DNA sequence: TTGAATTATACCTTATCGGGTATAAAAAAT
DNA sequence: ATTTTTTATACCCGATAAGGTATAATTCAA
């Protein structure tokens, strides 16, 4: 799990659970189009909607250091 | 810097730099009202605007583990 | 305490996000 | 190769975020 960007993080987590975008959107309670835009890196998304998705994975939006070198795993 | 919530994080960082909400909003290129809503925890804010503010502190929005116990400082 | 500075809340307008739907492209399976 | 599944892109509409402005509340200094 490299998590260079939020979009990659979401996609990787989703695939890890073996879900399609449609299944994820249903589970998260957001529109399918939103999941697409999220995974394709649209920057203007609303935080609450993004959090609905992240919570399925046990994550949420937070402030992260910009030049924080991401190590092997998501642990730091 | 405890950073339990994003709003607290922003406010603490701002005070650390000795800025008023107005000065921060100007530097970040967002409206004053946005900074207020950000620091009072409005959950429906747009990610790009939040990132404009966070970048002033060298931070950005990212996925963080939900039950990640925040230790003494922001370092983990 | 008084007054100035800072922060909070409410109203209004404009821009656009989120969602649905449809179509196309790409990927995966048979 | 063909079919099915999955993902991407475009259009439309309703809801609301963002910003400006004004007013109230709070904080802080003198």
Image (spheres, coloured by chain):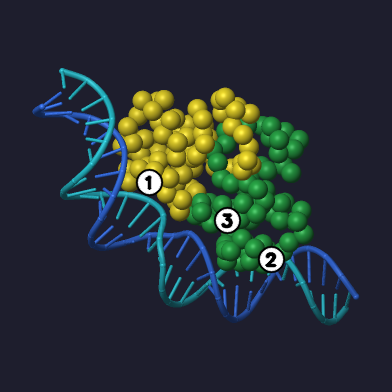
Chain colours: A green, B yellow, C blue, D cyan
Alpha carbon distance from label 2 to label 3: 14 Å
Q: What residue does disc 1 label?
A: B37
Residue at numbered disc 3: A52
**Same chain assignment for discs 1 and 3:** no
Q: At x 56% / y 52%, what residue is drawn?
A: A51
> Is circle 2 on the same chain as circle 1?
no
Asked whether, in this view, residue B38 is left or right of residue A53, the answer is left
Q: Which residue is mark 2?
A: A23
Q: Is residue B14 above or below residue D4?
A: above
Instruction: Characterize the local packing of mark 2: few (<14), some (14-19) or many (20 or more) Cα atoms within 10 angstroms.
Output: some
Does residue A60 show up? Answer: yes
Chain at tag 3: A
Disc 3 is placed on an element classified as helix
Name which residue lies at 48% across and 48% down.
B48
- Closer to the camera, A13 or A7? A13
Q: State the SS at label 1.
A: helix
Locate the C terminus of chain A and report the quarter of the image it occupies: top right
- Foreground residue, B24 or C6? C6
**Chain label for disc 2:** A
Q: Position of residue C27 (x, y in %)?
A: 78, 63
Q: Earlier in the sequence, mark 2 or mark 3?
A: 2
- How many marks the image carries: the answer is 3
Would you place residue C21 above or below residue B60 in this image? below
Kindly check if marks 1 and 3 are in contact, taking CB atoms under 8 A apart as contact. no
From the viewer's side, name the closer residue of A46 and B12.
Answer: B12
Q: Residues within 10 Å of mark 1 (few under 14, many from 20)?
A: some
Compared to B13, does A2 lie above or below? Answer: below
Chain letter of disc 1? B
């Amino acid at each position: 799990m490299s998590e260079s960007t939020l979009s990659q993080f979401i996609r990787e987590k989703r695939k890890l659970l073996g879900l399609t975008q449609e299944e994820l959107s249903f589970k998260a309670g957001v529109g399918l189009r939103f999941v697409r835009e999220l995974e394709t890196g649209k920057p203007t998304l609303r935080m609450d909607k993004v959090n609905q998705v992240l919570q399925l994975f046990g994550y949420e939006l937070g402030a992260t250091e910009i030049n924080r070198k991401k190590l092997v795993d998501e642990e730091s």
